[in-house]
Amino acid sequence: MRNRALTIAPLLFAGCEGVQSALAPAGRDAERIANLFWAMVVGGGVVWLIVMAVAVYGARAKHEHSEKLAGRFILWGGVVFPTVTITALLIGGLALLPPTLDLGPDEPRLAVVGEQFWWRARYRQGDQWVEVANELHLPTGRRTAMTLESPDVIHAFWVPSLGGKVDTIPGRTNHIAYEPTRAGTYRGACTEYCGQAHALMAFHVVAEEPAAFETWLAHQAEPATEPTDAEATRGAALFLEHGCGACHAVRGTEAAGVIGPDLTHVGSRAHLGGVLPNDTASLVRFIREPEAIKPDVRMPAFTTLSDAETAAIAHYLEGLR
Ligand code: CUA
């Protein structure tokens, strides 16, 4: 039995490591939240041990106690002790709110929108807004304030390794700020049930040095690169012919749709739709059967395209780095 407990314990805690864990903080706010969690675990553990010890003593004690002693025990153990510990916990928890709600000195530079079922993100770069999807970048050591909105249903934005979570609510603008302390790629998730593909509404945040972040953003602000080979040129033409540009934007081309993710630099992202590795096979699959990847997604399946046509479009998109 003990052996089994020892084998199960690592499995229980395996989920606490890695790219999506509030217990492996890589951001200022996530550190505060993790500290509160551990204080509660230790405090709760101590209280539990005391209660268990008293219960065992009570069950085994043979002699009777006086009414007076019992009254005192109830007063101190049942009233004073819980009042003091719960008040301390409340004060500790409330003290955490102002720093985690601090949006920093700058105007929000990042506007996040929860869509069906993906994340739209717009960065302010000078006087223009640069749109990306499902892969956000944030500078380390700086507080980045964001606004959060939704056009239709409620989603919740959360990157457990970096900070707290906040809902995106139609008709309302919410705010949060993240301040990564460690460079790396962290996974985020939608944590409010929003439809069939809710659990697949994942995204990634790349935390990097401020200089690398600015370079990335400047690159994202540029228009798409021209196709460099014959197949990509054919793919670009097919992309427009089949109406992909009605929903997707590829800046620098005629494609200027605003319904779906901006694809100007789609090839530069590590993941596709937040859930697939970004490669030719995933792109082909997404064009062919988006419903199989994200049920109830708004994108229609392009089953009328031949294999060669689908491959050409995928090749073109892959080259948009
Ligand atoms: Cu979006 Cu759940």
Image (cartoon, grey):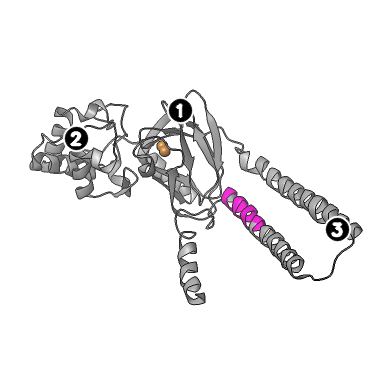
Q: From the image, tell me which residue sits under label 2.
A: 301
Q: Which quadrant, please, contains the C terminus?
A: top left
Residue positioned 79% across, 70% down in the render: 61
Q: Position of residue 24 (x, y in %)?
A: 52, 58
**Which secondary structure is most common in the magenta stretch?**
helix
Q: Residues within 10 Å of mark 1 (few under 14, many from 20)?
A: few
| Residue 254 seen in render | no
Residue annotated with mark 3: 70
Whether residue 260 sits left or right of residue 204 in the image: it is: left
Disc 3 from disc 1: Cα separation: 72 Å
User: Is residue 314 at least partly visible in the picture?
Assistant: yes
Q: Position of residue 72 (x, y in %)?
A: 88, 56
Magenta stretch bounds? 29-40
In the picture shown, does residue 264 fall above or below 162? above
Report whether 258 appears left or right of 11. Answer: left
| Rendered residue at 19%/35% (across/down) | 301
